[in-house]
Image: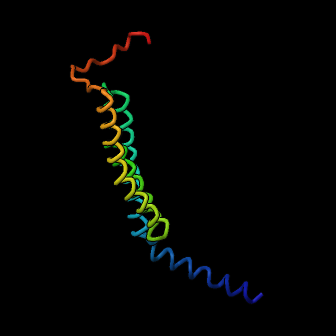
Amino acid sequence: MSLFVTIMAAAPAAAEHYVASGPTIDWLALLRFVGTVLSLAGGLFFVMAGTIGVIRLPDFYTRLHAAGMTDTLGAELILLGLIIQSGFSQMSLKLLLVAFFLLVTSPTATHAIAHAAYKSGLEPFLGKFKAPDLDEEV
């Protein structure tokens, strides 16, 4: 019974201290959250821009350029957001390693695909781009 009385006697004092000092803000957690959200949003923007480029651009080479450039940057920004969110841990080191390999291999693979297409005789589209007719049936 005395433990209950002690807790009940201490509760109003603790409540007054909390109200008087106000809630505290963890600025580091807030900064991590904002950095994560901005990085993930930027990555999503670049991935979506690359997707729209692949759909809208006229030939293989411009589509490959849109996919190679924007997906690399988009994936790097998404991985950066995950690194920020995970903090300094073993997981962040693994994500950093994945980001490094992605940064090295994605442009190399894009160049190799473009070079193979050129060597196989695929000519780039050099004419004017005509937007598709939206009324035409497919």
Residue 51 position, x and y percent, is: 39, 35
Task: Name the residue: 56% across, 76% down.
Answer: 15
Q: Is residue 127 left or right of residue 22?
A: left
In the rendering, at what x and y percent does residue 96 appear?
Answer: 41, 62
138 vs 1, left or right, is left
Q: In which quarter of the image is residue 11?
A: bottom right
Q: Which residue lies furthest to the right in this view?
A: 1
Residue 128 visible, this orientation:
yes
Q: Quick check: 81 above or below 136?
A: below
Q: Which of 30 and 83 is in front in this view?
A: 83
Quadrant for the C terminus in the image: top left
| 91 shown above or below 122 | below
Instruction: Give the vertical position of 36 relative to 114 (above or below).
Output: below
Picture coordinates of residue 93, whole percent (x, y): 44, 67
Q: Eyeballing the image, is 68 above or below 62?
A: below
Residue 92 found in image quarter: bottom left
Residue found 49% across the figure and 74% down from its top: 19
